[in-house]
Amino acid sequence: MFPALYAIIDPAFAPEPPVDFALKLVDAGVELIQLRDKAASGRKIHDEASELVAHLSPRGVRIIVNDRPDIAAMVGAGGVHVGQEDLPVEEARRICGRSLWVGISTHNIEQFREAALTSADYIAVGPVFPTAAKENPDPVVGLDFVRSVRSLTPKAIVAIGGITVESAADVFRAGADSVAVIRDLLSAPDPAGRAHEYLEIAARCKV
C-alpha cells in the first residue's frame, strides 16, 4: 500500500539539518520522505541525500530525490520525483532503473492523462489548495480535480499543495492515496506529533 503521508523536506525551510528532522518524522511512523532542495548545488544535494539514505533506508523508509534521477541512482535512494520542466518520466526511468520509484507532478487534466500512460509509479496532482511552498505556484486545482482523475488510473495519486490536518480528510475522501506535506510539517512546533495526526486521519479515512 502506498504510504498515506508523503513528507517533503526542504532544507531552506527546515528548522534543523534534514536528517535530524527526518528522524523525528520516522519515529512518528513516516515511511516516505522527499528531499527537495531547489537552491542547492548538485554536490550538496548528493551529500544530503546520501546521509538520509544511510540513516533511514535501513529503517525501511523510502527516500525520494526531487528533480535529480542521477543523484537518486548514485546514492541508492528509493526514487526520484520529476516536474513538468524536468526530464521526462521514461528518461528518468532509464537512469534509475525499475527498482526505484519515479513520480511526476501534474497540474491539469492533459498532463495527468499523459502521466497515466507512462511508467510512473505515482502521479502527484496540485496544488489542491493555495500554497506558499513555491515561488510561482500553478493554478489551484481543488478537490474536484482529485475526484475527476481518480477513475483515470490505478496508479497511486499524491495530492499536494496547501494541505493541512484540517483539510487532509477531505483530500483522502476525494480519492488521494497520499498527501504530500511541506510547510505544515516544517513549521509545526511538534513535527512528529503533526505527522502522527496525518497518519491517524488517513487511518480513519482510508478504510
Image (cartoon, grey):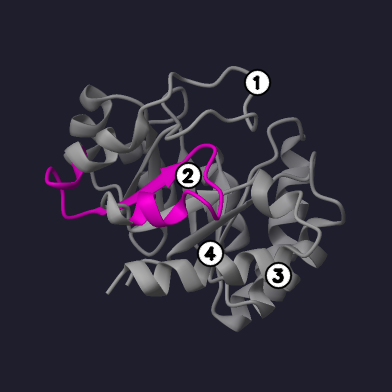
Q: Nearer the viewer, mark 2 or mark 1?
A: 1
* Residue denoted by label 4: 198
Q: Residue at x 59, y 17 (%)?
A: 136
Q: Amino acid at mark 1?
A: Glu
What are the residue bounds of the magenta stretch? 149-172
Q: Nearer the viewer, mark 2 or mark 4?
A: 4
* Label 4 crowd (10 A; few <14 / some 14-19 / many >=20): many
* Residue denoted by label 1: 135
Query: 20 or 177, which lies in front?
Result: 177
Residue 13, relative to residue 99: is it above or below? above
* Residue 81 marker: 2
* Residue 175 marker: none
Q: Residue at x 42, y 60 (%)?
A: 100
Residue 39, relative to residue 7: is it above or below? above
Cα separation between marks 2 and 4: 22 Å
Precedes in sequence: disc 3 or disc 4: 3
Tell me: 164 left or right of 10.
Answer: left
Quadrant, the C terminus: bottom left
123 falls in the magenta region: no
